[in-house]
Image: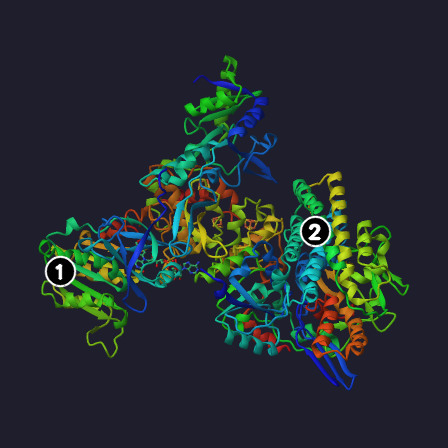
């Protein structure tokens, strides 16, 4: 086949609208790109003028899948700006909630969005007929994750009680005990998950790149930390712009980023590569079962890294609950802010990678806002991957090319609707 | 009543939104897998690749944020016997409509996209009912799973969707929550549409009105009560607009600023 | 029966023993407030509570109550749900006791509401004497409910170290004999009791500027009083006042069906005359469209309508509606305003 | 175990007749051969899964034939579902409930019926009973108003009433059309056309809420004493037996004290009309 025209309008099983364009003539790639066609929503623009108490609840709505991530990062940035320091219990609950989010999002991605490709199904629904046990396990794990979020914050999508200064609700001791039991029982499903994903025939594709994530000395970093790149750089969160260096391209409502090279990758694989040592031993076992060991440079294995993180989050959730129970859970009100003016920034490594929120407040009202979303940071890398992968598969049937490219896009677990309101705003 | 071959075909579409409502539907399957016994999903881009065009019910998530999206809505309206607005963005414009009340839409656009602002098409946010006729809505940010299931059942039974017109306080009282307003914390419960099980007050945070305002609210009294709870005028207006900023008569003004 | 006494330390064992055979519902702390909950641990019981958010009527008329189950399809069939949970309500105040007496009348007069009455028959009431007003909003003294001679199975009055127990029914006596370890009250205890009951009286204040018995006549002349418009302006129509009221019993009925639309249940829910839809019918007519008319209806029911139908005033002076109203609408103030301004 | 007052009995729909595009007449098999109702009483009708609503019994006890009739307008959940039924279906019913028309007080009197629209449904029950016992009543006059010719209920019976010499029947429609050569105008335009002996006349009216005020003015204007005017009122009802509170008209319960009320007795109730 000499001429290939792949044009995937609105890639499915991803969050948000993106198109793949590939044109090749006589085996030469003429055009290969990923367009973000999501309607702009202008979050940073319209949060200006709103009270600080609202901001993390509004920015939660950037993304329904990683709303805990946005809400947490946003609240942290506001806390930094307005001088509220979380209690120990508040910090633990945030981490526990975040584990629920990672678990929920990764189950969604690996089971609902990625797995169907390996079973030759178009979605998880026909998968019920093909392998009901797998779907039921997925539903169970997702419910477990959702319920974990719910006892802390009311629900997973757009957490309610997560506010600036902590939480407006404290889970009951009984609820935590109950949840602990369920998490322990969930190990069985987790083992089965590792087994399932270890048995999949992952596409062979290697491209070395710069991996960027948060890092911490004493724990596998999700909430807060230092920025670390696999090319050997480290920055405090405050200097996030040294990493992101945003620029705009016309075919995308999202902003692109670059650091040491022309592109970099964020997400589960980046975290896995940068912070392998801090993973829970059981997560390391899972990695071994999946045949993964840093540096993993096969992008498709981002989903493998997600499975590893699922194990980590389950185990670490049990640990956090034990810690909370041991300390004794206290009824606490959110910590009040100490000032109404200030500037603050924060970062979390959300399911899809490193996320930054940055605000300025005057008299309690937001005057400047900047949010840099992981998917955005991945576009450069995704395009580079596509351009490397395309020539390797260009001789295959068009349908196969199309599927491989879609699978590649999906491997990033892109969250396109998030990524449509990002830009480096100059703070004055 | 509904046999295998008579499953109702439904499709899901998304416009400017966070896709949390569609995710909620995916989550509804955890507790209501039998949904798939009564409806056949022919399109659901967030969760599946298959794509059919012969749907009877269209669930539309998200608000219309640009002129070029209207065409897609018209097509959906043409095909579907029943168009259901799914979630706050589709129902009231949701948080997206906050941009409509910024002093200048053009300035807001430039704030985000700088000198490249014109690369990205945008117009004042509209709930989908401002673009096409909508037969029903499922409110909330996100929607409530249980309510989604209930609406599906009601529609299949030929009933009204069954979205309450009464305020959140009713559900809040029935749950015997300690009233936040009485503790001096802001809550929009007295004028916001119920159906969420008063989830926010139950989790200690005042209602933000994501399900829209009830018919004939006593807004003056609500302002007085919020004032009493210590909110500034700015904060009171912010509460009222968080999910309910869209107003038809503001569109023209907003359009002029672009 | 002779007055008996229970040592304070005997309350927990009594509750514990009752829990063997009954669902025991009693006041528990909820944040800064109290609610009636099913007891799982007698230690959680709070007999020192001021008032609860919802009245104990929820035991007899649950907020959501299954009336029937049915199957749909070709030959639809419906069946009553009349299962009953033997219950002891422990620690009701006397105003709420009176509220339950009124509900008993409402649900048995003319047509027997089997659902309510069946549960009522299996429900025992252990009330407790309030020795001081729960807060400034209660006006039980006006409504004659600050103490009770009847309506309870057992009635407790707290003395320094013991509770004096009075049995109002044979069933109550039997409960106490079977589950409690009471002994006869000593003379000293009887004296202390009398002293406590006497000392209680002046601690309670009259809140109405007139005798409650005058309410029906006074309201009769006030149908077009300007106060209703004033209340309508302030009222948010949130329905809280009726929801928390021990003498409000209005309900709605709705069917719920399973996913396959083959079977379902018929449920009744608490409803409120303050909600806009309450009196609306097809064709766009709403017989109490304005908030003013709805507020008037509420107060008229409490002071007049219920009296005319059931020979008892429809308010027991518990003060819950005043406490709960975020718009600070007070039934006491409203009645007083009408009284003060009458010709 | 005693049966709950709220649990309907399942009964068979024998026949469904389309009266107008919005109203259908349901013939339902009486449980024990006989419903035993008074004209003006109503049934609580259920379709399981959909809900319940009060519907007047439209047939006369004098013509029971082991069944009774309900005339139903399609306005909401239950009534829509009823319109979707086919004969043979089973629906739930409980009743009859409420105070019907005090027929004993009407014997020997002249009767003036003034139904508007669907208000004919409950009145037809009484009218047919009166016709069946024609000798015990004085003059019988029927003034019936409907929105348009299409909306006229019970056309066959209307013809019959028009043809009888012992019944005076006048019909009007608010909006006429080419098929209509009768009166055009609201129901009150019929009153000048009739001559009655007010002292001996009992008037009975039922219709949409706004109609009452105007019809009452005419009736009182004719000199009919307040105590000889009966109205059947509609309210929202959830139980039908005086518990749910929805139908309250001040201290009265429309379901128990009504739906038929004597004007003299309710005119002091400002919420009534
Ligand atoms: C004594 C009596 C006798 C009657 N006799 C008859 C009779 O003979 N024939 C007859 O056809 N009718 C009769 N009715 C009227 C009938 O009971 C009502 O029209 C009843 O509401 C129909 O029930 P439904 O479930 O079909 O309508 P519903 O679903 O209850 O809807 C009725 C109307 O109320 C409005 N409504 C109700 N709930 C809502 C909501 N949540 N949101 C928005 N709108 C709402 C709608 O506008 C709708 O048009 C009688 C009523 C009474 C009290
Ligand atoms: S907390 Fe809010 S919703 Fe609940 S009763 Fe109070 S005002 Fe109403
Ligand atoms: S509680 Fe107050 S505001 Fe709410 S309905 Fe009652 S009177 Fe109105
Ligand atoms: S009207 Fe108010 S004070 Fe009276 S019984 Fe009801 S809630 Fe208590």
Residue C217 versus residue D61 in the image, above or below: above
Query: From where the camera sits, is residue A38 visible?
Result: yes
**Rendered location of residue A99, percent (x, y):** 73, 53
Q: Which mark is residue C173?
A: none
Judge from the rendering whether residue C234 lies leftward or rightward of residue D175; answer left or right: right
Name which residue lies at 84% across and 60% down: A273
| Image quarter in which the C terminus of chain A is found | bottom right
Query: From where the camera sits, is residue A160 visible?
Result: no
Q: Are marks 1 and 2 on the same chain?
A: no
Query: Image quarter for residue A292?
Result: bottom right
Residue A289 versus residue A240 in the image, above or below: above
- Residue position for label 2: A189
Give ligand 4's quarter of the image: top left
Name which residue lies at 61% across and 64% down: A126
| Image quarter in which the N terminus of chain A is found | bottom right
- Residue position for label 1: D140
Q: Mark 2 lies on which chain?
A: A
**Rendered location of residue D130, percent (x, y):** 15, 56
Determine the CA span between mark 1 and mark 2: 81 Å
């Amino acid at each position: 086949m000499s001429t290939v025209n792949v044009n995937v309008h609105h890639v499915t099983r991803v969050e948000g609208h993106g198109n793949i364009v590939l044109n090749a003539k006589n085996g030469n790639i003429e055009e290969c790109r990923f367009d973000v066609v999501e309607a702009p929503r202008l979050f940073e623009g319209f949060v200006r003028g709103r009270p600080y108490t609202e901001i993390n609840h509004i920015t939660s709505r950037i993304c329904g899948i990683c709303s805990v991530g946005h809400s947490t990062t946003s609240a942290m940035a506001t806390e930094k700006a307005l001088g509220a320091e979380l209690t120990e219990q508040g910090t633990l609950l945030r981490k526990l909630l975040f584990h629920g989010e990672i678990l929920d999002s990764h189950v969604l991605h690996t089971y609902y969005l990625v797995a169907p490709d390996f079973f030759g199904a178009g979605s998880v629904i026909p998968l019920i007929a093909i392998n009901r046990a797998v779907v039921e396990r997925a539903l169970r794990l997702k419910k477990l994750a959702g319920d974990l979020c719910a006892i802390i914050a009311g629900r997973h999508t757009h957490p309610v009680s997560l506010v600036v200064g902590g939480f407006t609700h404290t889970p009951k001791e009984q609820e935590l005990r109950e949840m602990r039991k369920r998490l322990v029982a969930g190990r069985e499903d987790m083992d089965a998950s590792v087994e399932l994903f270890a048995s999949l025939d992952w596409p062979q594709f290697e491209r070395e790149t710069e991996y960027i994530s948060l890092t911490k000395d004493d724990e596998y970093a999700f909430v807060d930390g230092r920025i670390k790149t696999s090319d050997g750089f480290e920055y405090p969160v405050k200097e996030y712009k040294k990493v992101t260096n945003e620029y705009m391209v016309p075919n995308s409502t999202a902003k692109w980023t670059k650091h040491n090279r022309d592109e970099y990758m964020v997400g589960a694989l980046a975290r896995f590569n940068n912070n392998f040592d801090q993973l829970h031993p059981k997560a390391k076992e899972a990695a071994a079962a999946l045949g993964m060991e840093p540096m993993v440079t096969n992008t498709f294995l981002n989903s493998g890294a997600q499975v590893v993180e699922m194990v980590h989050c389950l185990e670490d959730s049990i640990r956090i609950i034990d810690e909370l129970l041991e300390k004794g859970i206290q009824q606490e009100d959110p910590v009040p802010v100490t000032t109404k003016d200030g500037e603050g920034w924060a970062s979390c490594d959300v399911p899809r990678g490193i996320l930054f929120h940055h605000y300025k407040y005057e008299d309690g009202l937001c005057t400047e806002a900047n949010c840099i979303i992981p998917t955005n940071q991945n576009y450069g890398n995704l395009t580079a991957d596509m351009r490397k992968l395309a020539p390797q598969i260009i001789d295959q049937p068009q349908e196969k090319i199309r599927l491989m490219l879609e699978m590649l896009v999906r491997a990033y677990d892109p969250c396109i609707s998030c990524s449509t309101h990002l830009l480096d705003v100059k703070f004055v | 009543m509904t046999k295998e071959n008579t499953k109702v075909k439904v499709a899901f579409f998304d416009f400017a939104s966070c896709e949390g409502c569609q995710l909620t539907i995916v989550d509804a399957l955890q507790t209501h897998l039998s949904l798939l016994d009564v409806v056949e999903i022919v399109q659901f881009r967030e969760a599946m690749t298959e794509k059919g065009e012969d749907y009877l019910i269209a669930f539309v998530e998200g608000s219309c944020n640009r002129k070029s999206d209207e065409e897609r809505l018209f097509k959906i309206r043409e095909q579907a016997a029943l168009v259901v607005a799914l979630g706050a963005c589709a129902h009231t414009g949701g948080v997206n409509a906050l941009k409509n009340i910024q002093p200048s839409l053009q300035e807001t656009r430039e704030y985000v996209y700088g000198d490249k602002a014109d690369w990205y098409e945008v117009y004042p946010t509209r709930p989908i009912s401002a673009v096409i006729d909508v037969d029903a809505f499922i409110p909330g940010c996100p929607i409530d799973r249980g309510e989604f299931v209930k609406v599906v059942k009601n529609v299949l039974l030929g009933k009204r969707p069954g979205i309450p017109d009464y305020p959140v306080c009713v559900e809040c009282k029935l749950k015997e929550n300690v009233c936040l307003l009485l503790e001096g914390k802001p809550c929009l419960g007295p004028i916001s549409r119920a159906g969420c099980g008063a989830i926010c007050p139950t989790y200690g945070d005042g209602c933000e009105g994501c399900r829209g305002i009830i018919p004939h609210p006593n807004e003056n009294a609500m302002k007085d009560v919020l004032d009493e709870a210590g909110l500034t005028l700015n904060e009171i207006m912010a509460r009222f607009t968080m999910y309910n900023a869209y107003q038809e008569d503001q569109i023209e003004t907003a359009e002029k600023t672009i | 029966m002779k007055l008996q006494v229970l040592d304070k330390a005997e309350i927990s064992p009594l509750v514990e023993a009752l829990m063997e055979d009954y669902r025991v519902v009693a006041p528990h702390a909820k944040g800064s407030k109290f609610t009636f909950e099913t007891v799982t641990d007698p230690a959680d019981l709070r007999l020192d509570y001021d008032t609860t958010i919802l009245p104990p009527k929820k035991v007899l008329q649950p907020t959501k109550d299954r009336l029937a189950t049915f199957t749909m399809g070709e030959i639809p069939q419906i069946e009553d749900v009349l299962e009953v949970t033997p219950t002891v309500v422990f620690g009701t105040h006397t105003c709420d006791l009176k509220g339950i007496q009124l509900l008993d009348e409402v649900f048995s007069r003319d047509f027997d509401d089997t659902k309510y009455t069946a549960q009522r028959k299996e429900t025992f009431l252990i009330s407790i004497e309030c020795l001081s007003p729960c807060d400034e909003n209660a006006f039980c003294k006006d409504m004659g409910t600050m103490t009770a001679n009847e309506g309870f199975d057992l009635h407790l009055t707290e003395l320094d170290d013991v509770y004096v127990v009075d049995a109002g029914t044979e069933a109550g006596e039997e409960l106490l004999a079977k589950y409690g370890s009471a002994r006869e009250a000593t003379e000293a205890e009887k004296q202390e009791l009398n002293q406590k009951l006497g000392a209680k009286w002046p601690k309670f204040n009259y809140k109405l500027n007139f005798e409650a018995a005058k309410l029906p006549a006074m309201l009769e002349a006030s149908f077009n009083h300007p106060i209703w418009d004033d209340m309508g302006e302030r009222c948010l129509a949130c329905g809280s006042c009726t929801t928390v009221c021990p003498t409000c019993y209005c309900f709605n009925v709705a069917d719920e069906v399973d996913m396959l639309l083959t079977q379902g249940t018929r449920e009744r829910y608490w409803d409120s005359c303050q909600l806009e839809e309450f009196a609306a019918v097809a064709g766009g007519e709403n017989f109490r469209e304005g908030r003013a008319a709805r507020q008037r209806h509420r107060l008229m029911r409490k002071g007049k309508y219920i009296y005319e139908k059931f020979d008892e005033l429809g308010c027991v002076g518990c003060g819950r509606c005043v406490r709960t109203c975020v718009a600070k609408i007070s039934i006491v103030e409203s009645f007083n305003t009408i009284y003060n301004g009458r010709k | 175990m005693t049966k709950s007052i709220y649990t309907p009995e399942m009964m068979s729909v024998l026949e469904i007749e389309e009266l107008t595009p919005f109203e259908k007449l349901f013939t339902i098999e009486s449980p024990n051969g006989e419903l035993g109702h008074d004209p003006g009483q109503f049934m609580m009708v259920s379709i399981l899964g959909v809900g319940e609503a009060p519907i007047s019994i439209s047939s006369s006890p004098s013509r029971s034939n082991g069944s009774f009739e309900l005339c139903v307008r399609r306005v909401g959940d239950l009534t829509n579902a009823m319109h979707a039924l086919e004969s043979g279906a089973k629906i739930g019913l409980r009743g009859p409930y409420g105070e019907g028309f005090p027929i004993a007080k009407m014997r020997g009197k002249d009767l003036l019926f003034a139904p508007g629209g669907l208000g004919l449904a409950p009145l037809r029950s009484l009218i047919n009973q009166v016709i069946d016992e024609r000798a015990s009543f004085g003059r019988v006059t029927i003034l019936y108003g409907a929105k348009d010719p299409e909306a006229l209920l019970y056309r066959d019976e209307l013809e019959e009433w028009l043809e009888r010499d012992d019944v005076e029947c006048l019909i009007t429609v608010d909006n006429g059309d080419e098929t209509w050569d009768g009166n055009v105008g609201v129901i009150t335009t019929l009153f000048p056309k009739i001559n009655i002996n007010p002292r001996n006349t009992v008037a009975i009216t039922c219709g949409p809420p706004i109609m009452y005020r105007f019809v009452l003015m005419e009736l009182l204007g004719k000199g009919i004493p307040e105590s000889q005017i009966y109205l059947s009122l509609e309210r929202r009802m959830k139980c039908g037996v005086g518990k749910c509170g929805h139908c309250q008209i001040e201290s009265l319960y429309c379901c128990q004290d009504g739906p038929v009320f004597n004007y003299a007795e309710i005119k002091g109730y400002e919420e009534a009309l």
